[in-house]
C-alpha cells in the first residue's frame, strides 16, 4: 500500500503547492502532475482499482480542498463510453488530467450576448495527459470516456468548489442552447 498511497499524496501536494496563488501556472502544474502519473502509472492504477471496479456510474471523489486561496482536488470515475453534457465551471479555472484510460475533451466558447456555443477544439488525453482552462465565464466543455469497456479515471484541480454550474443542451440541431442549473455531488473522500 505504501507506494500506492504515496502517489496520491504526491499528486495532492503538487496541486496544493501550485494552487497556492489565485492564478496558478496551469501548464506547469499539468507538466508536474503528468510526470508523476507517467512514473507511477502502475502503482496508481493498483491504488485506484476499487474506483474502476465500483460500476456505479459517473462519480466524483474529493482528494483535497482549501478555502484560501480556494482550491479543490478530485478524482473522477468515468464509466465506459460516458459522455457529459456540455457544461461550464462557474467561472473557475481548472485542470483535468487522465490517470487511467483515455478521455476526449471538446472545448466550447459561449457567446456572452446570445448564449450560443461554438466548438473551439478537441483534446484526446491518455494517462498523464492534461488540459486546462482559465477562470472564464464563457468557457464550456464536454468530456467522454473513449473506452467501451473500461472505467477511466481523471484528476481535476479547480480554483474553488464546483458545487453549482450550468449544463447546456440544444433543443434542435442548429437551435438555441438552453442552460440548465446543476449541482455536483461528491461520492466520498479518498484516503490520502
Image (cartoon, rainbow, N blue to C red):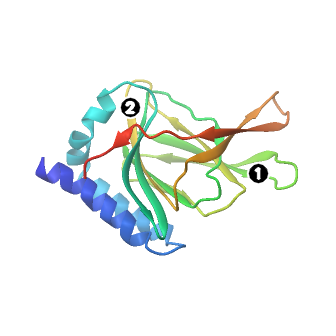
Q: Residues within 10 Å of mark 1 (few under 14, many from 20)?
A: some
Residue at the image position 64 percent from the left and 53 percent from the top: 90
Q: Residues within 10 Å of mark 2 (few under 14, many from 20)?
A: many
- Give x and y (percent) for residue 36: 29, 59
Mark 2 residue element: loop
For the residue pair 183 and 36, the one nearer the viewer reads as 183
On screen, residue 172 versus residue 126, left or right, reads right
Q: Which residue is mark 2?
A: 151
**Marks 2/1: CA distance?**
30 Å
- Give x and y (percent) for residue 22: 53, 73
Residue at the image position 84 percent from the left and 33 percent from the top: 174
Q: How many marks?
A: 2
Q: Which residue is mark 1?
A: 110
For the residue pair 73 and 31, the one nearer the viewer reads as 73
For the residue pair 53 and 64, the one nearer the viewer reads as 64
| Residue 39 in sight | no
Residue at the image position 85 percent from the left and 37 percent from the top: 176
Query: Which disc is residue 137 wearing?
Result: none
- Give x and y (percent) for residue 10: 26, 61
Amino acid at each position: 500500500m505504501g507506494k500506492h498511497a504515496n502517489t496520491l499524496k504526491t499528486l495532492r501536494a503538487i496541486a496544493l503547492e501550485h494552487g497556492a496563488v489565485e492564478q496558478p501556472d496551469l501548464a506547469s502544474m499539468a507538466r508536474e502532475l503528468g510526470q508523476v502519473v507517467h512514473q507511477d502509472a502502475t502503482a496508481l492504477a493498483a491504488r485506484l482499482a476499487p474506483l474502476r471496479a465500483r460500476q456505479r456510474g459517473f462519480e466524483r471523489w474529493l482528494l483535497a480542498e482549501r478555502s484560501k486561496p480556494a482550491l479543490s482536488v478530485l478524482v473522477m470515475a468515468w464509466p465506459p463510453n460516458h459522455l457529459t453534457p456540455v457544461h461550464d465551471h462557474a467561472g473557475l479555472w481548472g485542470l483535468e488530467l487522465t490517470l487511467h484510460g483515455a478521455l476526449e475533451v471538446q472545448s466550447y466558447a459561449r457567446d456572452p450576448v446570445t448564449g450560443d456555443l461554438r466548438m473551439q477544439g478537441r483534446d484526446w488525453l491518455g494517462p498523464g495527459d492534461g488540459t486546462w482552462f482559465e477562470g472564464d465565464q464563457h468557457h464550456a466543455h464536454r468530456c467522454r470516456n473513449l473506452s467501451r469497456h473500461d472505467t477511466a479515471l481523471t484528476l481535476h484541480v479547480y480554483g474553488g468548489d464546483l458545487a453549482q454550474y450550468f449544463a447546456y443542451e440544444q433543443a434542435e440541431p442548429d437551435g438555441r442552447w438552453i442552460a440548465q442549473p446543476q449541482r455536483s455531488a461528491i461520492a466520498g473522500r479518498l484516503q490520502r
